[in-house]
Image (cartoon, rainbow, N blue to C red):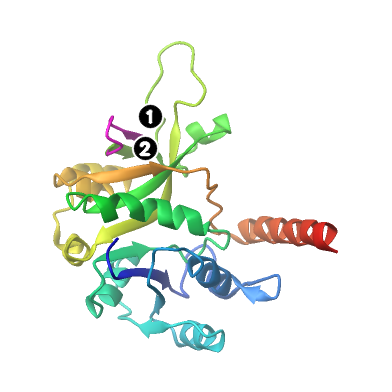
Amino acid sequence: MPRKILGVIPARFASSRFPGKVLAPIASKSMLQHVYERASLARYPTAVVIATDDERIYKAARSFGARVVMTRADHVSGTDRVAEAASAENAELVVNIQGDEPLIEPAAIDAAILPLAHDPGIVMGTLKKAIEDPREVTDPNVVKVVTDRNGDAIYFSRCPIPFERGQARPGTHFKHIGLYVYRRDFLLGYSALPVGPLEQAERLEQLRAIENGYRIRVVETEFESLGVDTPEDLERVRRLFEASMAREVKQYG
């Protein structure tokens, strides 16, 4: 296991569909605090840092004791923000943890890290989960992934992949869970890689690695991604928190 593994939570205030969502309250804590605390429970990251360009987020993160760094405001993507934070560190592996996943499973973070920890030839890793709701197969907002026999990604798409001719077989479609692990040097050079036609067509940044000949190891997980993109998503997550707290009260009194 590498001596230093850095978890980075990119957090920005400006969101087109839900501005300020990372500071939205959920069960007496901000969404960002939930993400930070759950990420900090993972076994393998040796440090977790929040990367932001907004003073409000910076102050909020400091208020609950998080390590936080200010980054440039002109980053095109969260990956670029993570890369800036990682450039000031000497960690061998860097984990990009989404700031809008308040129910992130610490074990899922560890599962994504393991392949890179054991195989120096892998420069990037992520997660997938079997699709249980058939509506997600055709939902363009749910990104699908197919892998080869080694578990490396062949393709990511908003369309149903694989396309099944005739009777569909359950359990053959996987959705992509947007948590990434990178080797530091690969991450720092990622934004300079040429953007290819597949990335342009699908609007999926991870296709850049595949189009430039790099492997992405995809680990299957049972973790159900519940990202918050809209106020409606936030209400759904709040209800899940309330139900979870009610179960704990009933179990432990």
Q: Amino acid at mark 2?
A: Val
Q: Is residue 77 left or right of residue 164?
A: left
Tag 2 near tag 1, CB within 8 Å: yes
Where is residue 247 shown, x and y percent of the image? 79, 56
Tell me the CA gap for discs 2 and 1. 7 Å
* Quarter of the picture holding the C terminus: bottom right
- Which residue shows up at 41% across the image and 83% down it? 68
Where is residue 218 shown, x and y percent of the image? 34, 43
| Numbered mark located on residue 99 in the image | none
Residue span colored magenta: 145-152
Q: Depth check: 128 or 140 in front?
A: 128
Q: State whether the magenta stretch is mostly helix, strand or loop.
A: loop
Residue 123 visible at all: yes
57, above or below 128, in the image: below
Q: Depth check: 28 or 134 in front?
A: 28
Where is residue 52 shown, x and y percent of the image? 40, 78
* Quarter of the picture holding the N terminus: bottom left
- Which residue shows up at 18% across the image and 60% down it? 186
* Residue denoted by label 2: 145
Where is residue 250 shown, x and y percent of the image? 84, 58
Task: Decide: few, some or many residues near mark 2? Use Cα within 10 Å; few <14, some 14-19, many ≥20.
Answer: many
157, above or below 165, in the image: below
Task: Decide: few, some or many residues near mark 1? Use Cα within 10 Å; few <14, some 14-19, many ≥20.
Answer: some
* Residue denoted by label 1: 161
Q: Secondary structure at mark 2?
A: strand
Q: Secondary structure at mark 1?
A: loop
Q: Is residue 51 magenta?
A: no
Residue that sits furthest to the top in the current view = 166
- Which residue shows up at 23% across the image and 67% down it? 92
Q: Quadrant of residue 201?
A: top left
Q: Amino acid at mark 1?
A: Ile
